[in-house]
Image (cartoon, helix red, strand yellow):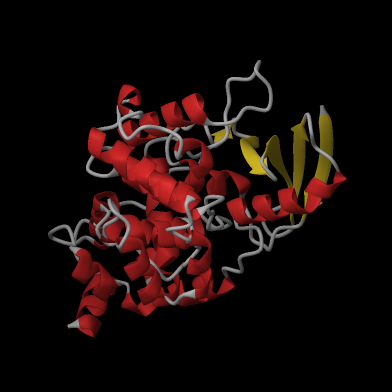
Amino acid sequence: MGKIILTSKPSPPFRLDLTVWTLRRQESNTVDRFDGEKYQRIIMVQNKPLEISASQSGSLEKPYLKVEAAGPQLDANDIGAVRKQVELLLGLRVDVSGFYRYVKLEPRISDLARAFRGVKPPRFPSVFEALVNAISCQQISLAVGMLLMNRLAERYGAAVNDQLRWRAFPSPDVLSRLQSDSLRPLGYSLQKSKYILGLAKAITKGEVNLEQLDEMNDEQVLASLQSIPGIGRWSAQYAMLRGLGRLNTFPGDDVGAQNGLKKLLGLRKRPDYQRIAELLEPLKPYSGLVYFHLLLNRLGHEGFIRLSNAELVQSTPRRDKTTRRILRNVA
């Protein structure tokens, strides 16, 4: 078993735990694992499964990250690819200082930023994984969607060795060989099975090229993704944020995010897609970071993140001055 150890200095501020929970979303996630100190995942490097683990030392403002990678075929040529994937996964090089400057003018959002200072915007290793996550969670709870994805990885993901339960997220190449109803035994509906496996087949045949999305503007990306069967506006924007790192994208059709914003700003009713766009217009370049902060606030209230009650941002019982000012500005 080959092994390499890398060290990295993330762009400050940085907190591994907050960043990992933004990626995990659920305690049951078996692809992205975290024991409170160490983050673990199996990644694919040149078609080889490698187990990585990352732990943080130093401080919030002077962070250090130790990354270990292990696998039976690991060699020195893999070091650069491992480093690149970890930096992408954990957003280590993303500068969020502009976000902190923006939110100073919006007290409720500023409270969120202070409570979760150090979170970086994570990304899935591929747009394909982001899209499969989106399809899996359509019209069902996140908990059920996570269960489906765990089963998908356990059944079709590559393992570092046969003695380990953990698996990598399955590649399009592996899934493209399956029949259209092959995911039904895992709990997927026939329609979702067709969407996921159809996408995998289209990628392997060269009919869909997700790599070229990086070269497109937001409107072009949105249109291109929505042309894929099974991908609507929410799924496309979800993939833009979590797969492409477009931090100016807030999946406005996300019910959980709508509820979080309603509670945060003390709105009388849950904001729809258009109202969210209006409310977040002042923060447009970083609206995706607001989405991640709302997720962390919910996870904090549910007890998954170690924060004091004083740090958690409570719901606003009524429209405060900030909310009224925002609403006036967009009226």
**At 68% across and 22% down in the image, what residue appears?**
161
Q: Give the x, y percent position of residue 317.
A: 21, 56
Residue that protrudes farthest toward the top in the picture: 163
Q: Position of residue 297 (x, y in %)?
A: 40, 49
Where the N terminus falls, by quadrant?
A: top right
Count the numbered circles shown: 0
Visible residue check, residue 90: yes
Residue 78 relative to residue 192: left or right:
right
Using the rendered view, name the quadrant where residue 301 is placed.
top left
- What percent of the width, then of the height, locates residue 266? 21, 60
Q: Single out the residue that lies furthest toward the right.
A: 76
Q: Is residue 176 above or below residue 313?
A: above
Compared to residue 291, the image places residue 100 above or below, namely below
* Res. 251 visible in picture: no
Query: Looking at the image, which is closer to me, 101 or 284?
Result: 284
As drawn, is 8 to the left or to the right of 161?
Answer: right
Which quadrant holds the C terminus?
A: bottom left
Residue at 32% across / 77% down in the picture?
A: 281
Spot occupied by residue 29 in the image (x, y as percentages of width and height): 47, 32
Relative to 33, 84 lies left or right: right
The residue positioned 46% from the left and 56% from the top of the image is 242
Q: Nearer the viewer, residue 1 or 256?
A: 1
Q: Residue furthest front?
A: 205
Q: Which residue is painted at 68% across and 27% down in the image?
A: 160
Q: Nearer the viewer, residue 149 or 94?
A: 149
Task: Establish if 328 lies above or below 183.
Answer: below
Q: Quadrant of residue 11?
A: bottom right
